Image (tube, grey):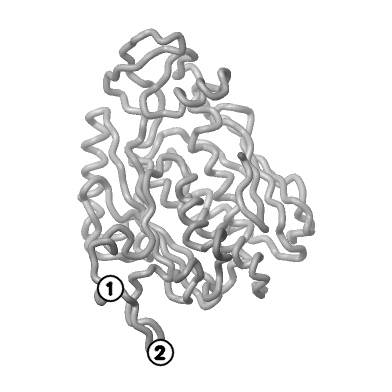
Amino acid sequence: MNTFGISLRLTTFGESHGIAIGGVLDGMPPNLEIDFEKIQTLIQRRKGGENTYVTPRSEEDKVEFLSGIFEGKTTGSPIAFIIHNHNTQSKDYQRDILRPSHADFTYFHKYKHYDYRGGGRSSARETLVRVVASGLISPILQGIEVQSGIYSIGKVKAKQIDFSYAQTSEIFSLDPQMEDSQKALIQEIRSQGDSIGGVVWAKAKGSKLLGLGEPIYGKLDAKLAEAMMGINGVKAVEIGEGIESSYMKGSEYNDCITPQGFKSNHSGGILGGIGNGDEILIKVYFKPTASISLPQNSITTSNQAITLQIKGRHDPCIAIRGSVVVEAMMRLVIADMILLAKKDFC
């Protein structure tokens, strides 16, 4: 299953250490002007090698568009694009070793033969394709603003939420007062050869969100949750109050309605699987990066017990760059829902 979406379909291909990764975006309406600057901005935000808080692997990440765009506008045919891989270090990976908490074990048992270098197809390198696609759809999202940022690193949580500040933060922190503490934790964990988990908070706002969603098996919240769970390393998703709602009384949770709108937004902007026009709020929980340099017990493909220390270049906290991917997937889901609803987006 390498295709995502219903009306707007993204198919991705390629491996972390292969020749290239790429995608085919099908279902784009014709005559839409592509914002190439927006695409490049999104790519830069996701890039590794830019600071000490992410992987030192530095790729050019230059996108080559092969079809579907002519004279800067969509033609209505599939948009195909590739990004070549250059800065690979495949020697850091061993063919017969199944690394703990990676997809090595399951890929080996499912396929019997797979590209083990850098995780192959299961590598987060593939998420760059999703980010590029999320830039291509900018014309569809006119009037809708999608933002994301880091809510917590480990147990160091934001006390205030500032999405504008997250755009300028090295780690996309939502709280300028907690950023230094979050950075210090990342550096401490990295110096120990370990990794740490984190939580991304994302939101979407705009009048066109009202009415989006296709109940009962195409609910907006269900599609958002599915998209987020499809991101590497994501282990949980909350919409609105999420888990906290199970501890609340109805009188506390219900979003009362006035002629001016909702008095609160515990539902996270979605009722009955349909956007209610309020801000869509979602939290996405990332596990710690699986690749750590501490000694770990594992096995080989022939079931021999071993102790290994993983080499290579890895993010100490995948949630940081994951926040850019969360935003990309949110944009893709909303664009798909807009096309399904046949809403005007020009």
Q: Secondary structure at mark 2?
A: loop
Q: How many marks?
A: 2
Q: Residue furthest bottom?
A: 259
Report crowding for label 2: few under 14, some 14 to 19, many 20 or more residues within 10 A (C-alpha). Answer: few
Identify residue type, mark 1: Gly
Q: Position of residue 308 (x, y in %)?
A: 33, 15
Q: Quadrant of the C terminus?
A: bottom right
Q: Which quarter of the rendered picture does the N terminus lie within? A: top right
Left or right for 292, reference 90: left
Identify the secondary structure beneath mark 1: helix
Q: Which mark sits nearer the N-terminus, 1 or 2?
A: 1
Residue indicated by mark 2: 260
Residue 40 coordinates in the image, percent (x, y)? 57, 52
Q: CA distance from mark 1 to mark 2?
A: 22 Å
- Seen in the image, is 34 located left or right of residue 306? right
Q: Which residue is mark 1?
A: 250
**Residue, x 27% and y 22% (percent of image)?**
294
Query: Does residue 267 lie above or below 197 as drawn?
Result: below
Q: Tell me where residue 143 sits by quadrant.
A: bottom right
Compared with 230, 173 (above or below) is: below
Which residue does the image show at 42% across and 12% down from the upper left? 300
Q: Report if residue 170 is visible in the image.
A: no
